[in-house]
C-alpha cells in the first residue's frame, strides 16, 4: 500500500507538486475513483483546505470526473488516467497562444 506522509513546506502548507503526486498515487490505487472528501481523509487534509484539493484536481491533466455520487451528498468522483512515461508533453488550454 501507499504511505501518506505529509509533504509540508516551512509555512505549514502542503506544496502543490507533492499534493498532486499524492493524489495521483492514491487515485491510481483506487481505480473506481474517489470523492474529494475521501481523498482529503486519506491525506489528512482539514475541512478548511478541501478547496485546495479541488483546485489541484482541476489542474491535473490526467484527472477527470468519472461520475457523480447521487446517494446522499452530490459529489464528483475523480479518477486518473495512467500516463505513459514516454508520452508526448501535456498541452493545456491556457498554453495556447490565443488564450
Image (cartoon, grey):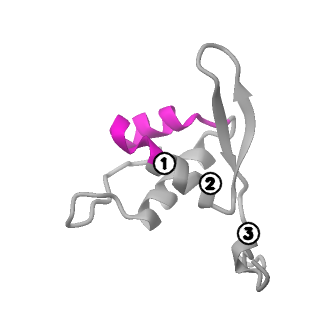
Residue 45 appears in the rendering = no
Q: Does the magenta segment cover residue 39? A: yes
Residue in view at x 31 percent, y 53 percent: 6
Give the side of residue 92 with respect to residue 8, left or right.
right
Magenta region, mostly helix, strand or loop?
helix
Query: Which corner quadrant of the image does residue 66 belong to?
Result: top right
Query: Could you tell me which residue is drawn at 74 percent across and 78 percent down?
Result: 86
Give the label on residue 58, or none.
Answer: 2
Mark nearest the camera among 3 and 2 is 2
Q: Residues within 10 Å of mark 1 (few under 14, many from 20)?
A: some
Q: Are marks 3 and 1 in contact (CB under 8 Å)?
A: no
Q: Element at badge 2? A: helix
Report the residue marked by disc 3. Answer: 84
Is 28 within the magenta?
no
- Gap in Å between the C-alphas at discs 3 and 2? 20 Å
* Residue span colored magenta: 33-51
- Of label 1 and label 2, which has the lower sequence position? 1
Q: Residue at x 48, y 48 (%)?
A: 53
Q: Identify the residue position indicated by label 1 in the image.
A: 53
Above or below, 35 against 7 in this view is above
- Tell me the distance, in whole angstroms, between the alpha carbons under discs 1 and 2: 9 Å
Amino acid at each position: 500500500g501507499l504511505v501518506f506522509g505529509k509533504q509540508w513546506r516551512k509555512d505549514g502548507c502542503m506544496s502543490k507538486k507533492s499534493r498532486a503526486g499524492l493524489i495521483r498515487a492514491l487515485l491510481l490505487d483506487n481505480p473506481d475513483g474517489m470523492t474529494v472528501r475521501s481523498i482529503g481523509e486519506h491525506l489528512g487534509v482539514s475541512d478548511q483546505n478541501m478547496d485546495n484539493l479541488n483546485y489541484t484536481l482541476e489542474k491535473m491533466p490526467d484527472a477527470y470526473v468519472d461520475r457523480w455520487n447521487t446517494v446522499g451528498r452530490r459529489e464528483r468522483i475523480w479518477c486518473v488516467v495512467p500516463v505513459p512515461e514516454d508520452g508526448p508533453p501535456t498541452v493545456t488550454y491556457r498554453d495556447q497562444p490565443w488564450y
